[in-house]
Amino acid sequence: MVDTLTRRRFLLASGVTGAAALAAGAGTVSWREIAGRAEADPLPADANVLVLVTLYGGNDGLGTVVPYADRAYHDARPELAYGPDEVLALDGQLGLNPAMKGFKSLWDADRLAIVRGVGYPKPDHSHFRSMDIWQSGSPDHPADTGWIGRWLDATQPDPLRVVSVGATLPPLAVGAKAAGVALPLTSFDAPAGPVGAGVRQLAAADRADPPSQAMAARATGALLSATATFGPPLDAASGSSDDDDDDLKTRGASAGGQGGLARQLEIVARCVRAGVPTRVYAVSLGGFDTHADEKGTQSRLLGELDSAVSGFLAGMDSDPRGSKVVVAIYSEFGRRVAANASQGTDHGTAGPLLVAGHPVRGGFYGDQPSLTSLDAGDLKVTTDFRSVYGTLLEQVLDTEAGRVLDGTRPTLDFL
Amino acid sequence: MSDVSLLLRRTGFGTTGAEIEAATRRGYEATVDALVHPGADPGATATPPPDLSGEPARPPAPDDKDARRAYARQLRSRSAALTLWWLDRMVRVRHPLVERLTFTWHGHWATSIQKVRSPAMMLRQNQTLRSLGRGDFRELARAMVRDPALLVWLDGQKNKKGKPNENLARELMELFTLGVGHYSETDVREAARALTGWRVDRTHATAAPLARHHDDGSKTVLGVTGELDDRSLVDLLTARPESAAFVAARLWSRHGSAALPPDTLRRLVAAYGPGRDVTALLRAMFLEPAFRADRSSLVASPVEYVAGVFRALDVAVPRDGRAGRALLGTLDALGQVPFRPPSVGGWPSGLAWLSTAATRERLTFAAAMARTADLDVVAGSEDRPGAAAYLLGVDAWTDRTLAALRDAAADPVRLVTLALVSPEYLAR
């Protein structure tokens, strides 16, 4: 029905959870609660941790892992293309975007896997539909649960096992029975004193409440379940970024997403070091919808991704639990092979998916899509995204893929 | 909640006991007619838009750090002036549906100053949404595909013959006129060709056609072949039956409730008719049995909430300075700043505003507003909870809320603070 579809899309667009998540008990978690759990019930030292990085807007795969030696690449986008002397060459064919120096070091240390040509059957070019498919893990029929949410359902439905950094929970973290929690970047206090007492009274259900009032009362209750300061113990100045001062970075902003990735990952690092029993963290970076002037915008964003992820992994090196962390980076689609008239690219299909960390076996996985045998100007998918999800589920989250994903697909060897 | 009170909340920015009484005296249908046919509005006249002329042609070069800082500062202060002006307008108008609907269209044709970076162009778009938002939807759509801010936002000014840029064409079909699933990828590519050849002038906040970049060849969109341009493309899209259903469902989701029964949708589409009449559609919506009988299933969006509190408590909107910045900070923390939707998909509707962080922020804002306002009507009443209900346009408190307000009755500021964060006040 129209309504369900539009609502889902809106929720997705702004990364907000819907009624399903509220019903599943999705909420916000305080730093105090998280730290308390780390003491009472720490993450076992041998448990792997998955950090999912969602790039909103459709990151251009050909500008990320560049087929610099392919003539068809230079012909299709002469003004956008990087030459052999610019890329950080990985082999005689492919090189990383010049802004990805940290990823190049990870590659050299055999700790970066590049899965090529990743996508799903019958690609959809809508940001909202495509992100819905990636986050639900269900390309064939719309699903109201996310793949990580279903993992929670299938294993141990403890919300703290999935933490999303930011004010709201992405759909990937919402299951049918359980949902992950959002750890806000800003801190706030639970209401105290006489007003706090009044707010406590307002959180009670009343028989006369219509549906909206009942939900509002529940939301008030969720606020009170926090006993102390919300939010992570970062000082306000730490890593805060005012994206708006950089007009080159906001040119791909129309498809949404948040900034400040380094700050989000700093919070993840603190959680891991503290032994918080979280197995999956979700972070994100927006702005990749580069229909115009792509080169500068994408290289700035990839530079932010590069320094945030490589800085995070370098910090994890010194921690025993950090050596079990795997970072996976994906976007809702890649972009069209040929440039448009505005030195940008339109929505496309397959793209590379990056997996990095100590447990990772570096190298290429999956075939590089051909630049000459295209599907209406788009790359043909060579690797089904469920192969990647299946590998992460089995190797990082110790869960048989079939319990979370429809059907079985071959897993990959990057872990 | 009475049908009149629900109607006023869904068409304005909160309401008051006095407004509910007047509407009840007038009768439901007469109130609907007055809503959709508003007369002159002294509140609108008293809040003329800020002068935003003299926009710099382009940002300074990347290496000129001082000039870039000054540019960013100026951009921030002009966009703050624009946003606070609109809030002030929302608060001071006599007929709030005009601004509510303008805000609904802003969320529909969702364009953000974050990328447009021109308060003057955003203001121009806002005026287009206001002046054309209540008539023929086709006229609005025709104007929007030539709107300078939308063109910049979706790279329409960079869409040229030979190598079209598909951003605007895709969102025009997916988000603005038809809805996903009612067109093919080929339709998107062909529609992009029809939209080629527009140029934006930042200094004057205008857009103009540029013949040499327009593709005047034959195109085929949704089975119709011809030398389509932006106008004939919009005419073709807005004439599709799916477009009527899409527009009706969108307006219902913002002003109606969570569920849209199929026979209601049929009647809304019939009212919209071949003339795509938005006012007729709204009137039919407000008179729908499903609208009147519905128990509240939505909550106030942050902008509705904040403007509603200013209106109910009769507090002046700060237009600048520290108080103005604090107000913008409140909206940001609540997740909804006018002129800054999170993406081209707009803001969420429904219950998504009930996040824990937003609940906390509403409490902070409510307490500050209660401290600022003149609460003599509450303090001077023998029934303080009842006086607060009248002030805020709440028909009746539940037993739960009444108990909380009675416990706070000795302190009018605390009582009004709690009333402002009560489930009853948030319901739509």
Image (tube, rainbow, N blue to C red):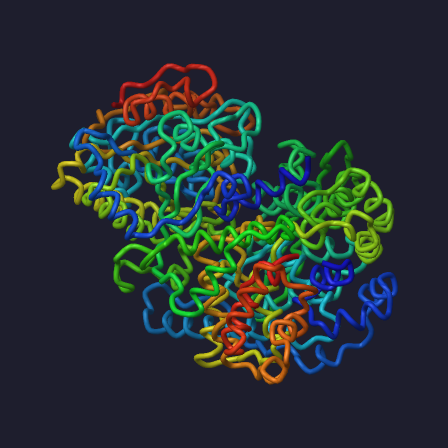
Determine whether, in the image, residue B193 is placed left or right of residue B138.
Answer: left
Name above or below for residue A402 compared with residue B241. Answer: above
Is residue A399 something one can see in this rendering?
yes
Is residue B155 something one can see in this rendering?
no
Question: A144 or A344: nearer the eye?
Answer: A144
| Residue ID at (31%, 38%) | A83
| Residue ID at (77%, 50%) | B293
Report x, y in % for residue A63: 37, 38
Q: Quarter holding the C terminus of chain B?
A: bottom right
Name above or below for residue A6 compared with residue A403. Answer: below
Name above or below for residue B218 compared with residue A220. Answer: above
Report x, y in % for residue A412: 32, 19
| Residue ID at (23%, 43%) | A38
Q: Quarter holding the N terminus of chain B?
A: bottom right
Report x, y in % for residue A222: 44, 51
Report x, y in % for residue A414: 27, 23
Image quadrant assignment for residue A72: top left
Determine whether, in the image, residue B404 is placed left or right of residue A157.
Answer: right
Question: A346 or A403: nearer the eye?
Answer: A403
